[in-house]
């Protein structure tokens, strides 16, 4: 495509508590996640935003990470039934990365689970209606649980200066929040959950705003306090995420993939000690091992176009995989792809050919994450 | 906003079997429905496309109307459990407009149900993951049924010349397909379902392409045959839809609304003779009657901006409703809104004030659909 199409706006594409501020700062591009706007570019180039993210601090409107609230006597039972990760030792105040799988071990979503109380959880979700999945399961099975989407909108504060900015606004207690832990802070006489997490490798926090009407206030407070730290609006940065090997639901994983294919083996309890949807399928796949896995592929030539659908990856004259996301790595100064590669060809160093849609066949090499070179 | 933001493209936003052709024809704007591209503007203005739709014939890539396939011994049981519409007399070959509701009678989706066999159904869905809802319900309840998203992508042929074009391509049998009926036609030695349906009031068909690789062929065949009928690329036209009083899930109805509020009373069986999710809630609401309903509101002044979130509707100095979708009606030469209005104020002729986001309070009048004036 020579020019990028606009996005048609309607009420169905939900605005967020931060959309007004994001518009004021000149948002130039959106994606849609969970029927909600996700900013993806502002006035500066994505390259400039990348370098800024690695040096300073950014505010990201990630309200599209909707929370699915599961609460009630059977809440823990439902949540454990939904994921192969062993939750028996999960503690209140902990964030846990989990996959949700179906009876064939196909991935439904890969949310962050926040354990608020023994009988009260949030799933901070990627792009699929986990609300309907959880409601359907609980209604079908007759579980004593309520499943809702509360008025909670995450604002991410990401980058090396995130901690100093957060401390300035919320006080020194935020320093004590461990990685993938959350605590409560006070804002305008409201208790907000704050976790040390986020969709970058630069460190930072996510603030779970629980009152939409405070969106402008929260943004403005962080914005003003952040001036001395060179704060800027940002968004999950595609280049930074791919260099960091962070996966994206809908890109690296779909319902056609199982957790092993996405290198999530460590989050799968296979010893039979817990029961969950898809356990038998997962055990069966585990016995033979997965037939493909996500790897990196570095490949030559000019920066490739946007990867809007998988491109073939070839070795020994046959199709051995496909790209899932492709960026121009600013560290490597080369094309870098996350890619699903068949088992015979997934070892680091394997030479492959990537067929880009411009018809060019480009030489590439399989790499594993984390990339030691970055 | 002064300029409309772009849409960020990735594999997660799915392309369709027709995207290549749609790009070639210069698609200018997309919406996202069911994680899939929906064209919303081409090179001509939306006004020109409106008049063209009313006179000629258009091809619409509505592949985003994904099919949720429900099949197996318990298929009929599951489908009836999911909807308040009485399906006991549904016939093979029939399309039925239904709502799916949750236990509080909140609307989950409003698909078209296609009854393919006694134990085999498609739900042609609006924008929510009905696949997860149906899978969750069946898994939770232990129903003997498979739930899938097959490789089926609807292409709509809409407008007064749709029938003559369809006859030219598929033969005279398509003339016999009644409104909201479907039949099978042959295309390149593939059997395709074709229904007389579509998201406009201009008449037409939807072709359920069941093999993505045939997308270009199907498009090209209709395109070439349609040259003598002045065929053009199109899309669900916002102005035409609102003038016709057609509702949109996510705009006029959400999980916060029940079917009565959306004037779908006729699709709700309340006599207790069938069992479905949300029946008790629906019966309870029915006893007192709904507190609000979708109506039209015609209001004065210059063309209003895009309605990206509900605008307040005021009468007697108090808030009595909100807009859901707003267009500049080309028939009325006035602003026309679909709007949710409280019971005391929903009668045709009621004077109201619409508060548009430019801060202007505009005088308006409640109207009922169908609009006699159009």
Image (cartoon, coloured by chain):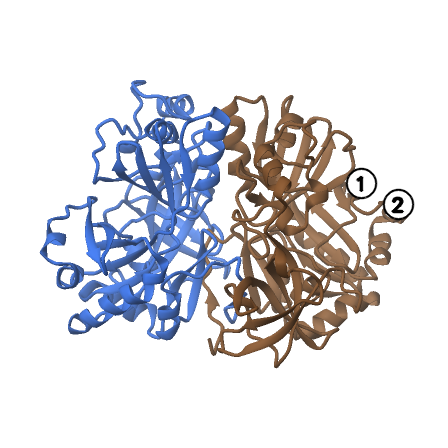
Chain colours: A brown, B blue
In the picture provided, is A317 more to the left or to the right than B189? right
Helix, strand or loop for disc 1: strand
The one of B48 and B186 positioned closer to us in this rendering: B186
Question: Which disc number belongs to residue B190?
Answer: none
**Label 1 crowding class (10 Å Cα cut-off): few <14, some 14-19, many 20+?**
many
The one of A335 and B93 positioned closer to us in this rendering: A335
Q: Residue at x 22, y 54 (%)?
A: B205
The x and y percentages for residue A268 are 68, 39
Q: Is residue A322 visible?
A: yes
Q: Name the outermost residue toward the front.
A: A316
- Mark 1–mark 2 distance (CA, rounded to whole Å): 9 Å
The x and y percentages for residue A73 are 65, 21
Q: Is residue A32 above or below residue B256?
A: below
Q: Which residue is mark 2?
A: A176
**Which of disc 2 and disc 1 is earlier in sequence?**
2
Helix, strand or loop for disc 2: helix
Q: Is residue B9 visible?
A: no
The x and y percentages for residue A215 are 66, 51
Chain label for disc 1: A
Q: Which residue is mark 1?
A: A183
Q: Is residue B73 above or below residue B178?
A: above
Question: Which quadrant is the C terminus of chain A positioned in?
Answer: bottom right
Query: Mark 1 and 2 residues: CB-CB less than 8 Å, in contact?
Result: yes
Chain label for disc 2: A
In the picture provided, is B4 more to the left or to the right than B63? right
């Amino acid at each position: 495509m020579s020019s990028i199409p606009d996005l048609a706006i309607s009420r169905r594409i939900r605005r967020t508590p931060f959309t007004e501020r994001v518009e004021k700062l000149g948002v130039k591009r959106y994606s849609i996640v969970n029927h909600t706007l996700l900013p993806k570019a502002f006035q500066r180039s994505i390259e400039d935003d990348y370098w800024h993210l690695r040096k300073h601090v950014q505010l990201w409107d990630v309200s599209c990470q909707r929370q699915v609230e599961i609460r009630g006597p059977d809440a823990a039972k439902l949540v454990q039934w939904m994921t192969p990760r062993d939750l028996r030792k999960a503690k209140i105040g902990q964030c846990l990365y989990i996959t949700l799988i179906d009876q064939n071990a196909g991935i439904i979503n890969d949310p962050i689970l926040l354990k608020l109380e023994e009988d009260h959880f949030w799933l901070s979700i990627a792009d699929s209606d986990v609300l309907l999945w959880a409601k359907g399961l609980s209604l079908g099975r007759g579980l004593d649980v309520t499943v809702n989407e509360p008025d909670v909108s995450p604002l991410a504060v990401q980058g090396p200066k995130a901690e100093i900015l957060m401390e300035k606004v919320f006080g020194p207690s935020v320093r004590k929040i461990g990685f993938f832990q959350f605590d409560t802070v006070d804002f305008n006489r409201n208790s907000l959950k704050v976790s040390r997490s986020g969709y970058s490798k630069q460190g930072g926090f996510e603030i779970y705003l629980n009152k939409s009407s405070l969106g402008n206030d929260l943004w403005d407070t962080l914005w003003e306090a952040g001036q001395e730290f060179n704060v800027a609006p940002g968004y999950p940065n595609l280049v930074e995420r791919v260099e960091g090997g962070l996966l994206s639901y809908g890109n690296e994983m779909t319902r056609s993939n199982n957790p092993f294919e996405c290198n999530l083996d460590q989050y799968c309890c296979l010893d039979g000690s817990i029961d969950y949807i898809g356990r038998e399928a997962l055990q069966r796949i585990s016995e033979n091992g997965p037939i493909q896995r996500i790897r990196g592929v570095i490949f030559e030539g000019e920066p490739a176009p946007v990867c809007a659908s998988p491109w073939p990856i070839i070795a020994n004259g046959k199709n051995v995989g496909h790209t899932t996301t492709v960026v121009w790595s600013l560290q490597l100064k080369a094309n870098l792809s996350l890619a699903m590669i068949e088992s015979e060809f997934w070892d680091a160093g394997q030479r492959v050919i990537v067929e880009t849609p411009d018809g060019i066949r480009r030489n590439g090499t399989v790499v594993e994450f984390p990339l030691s070179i970055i």
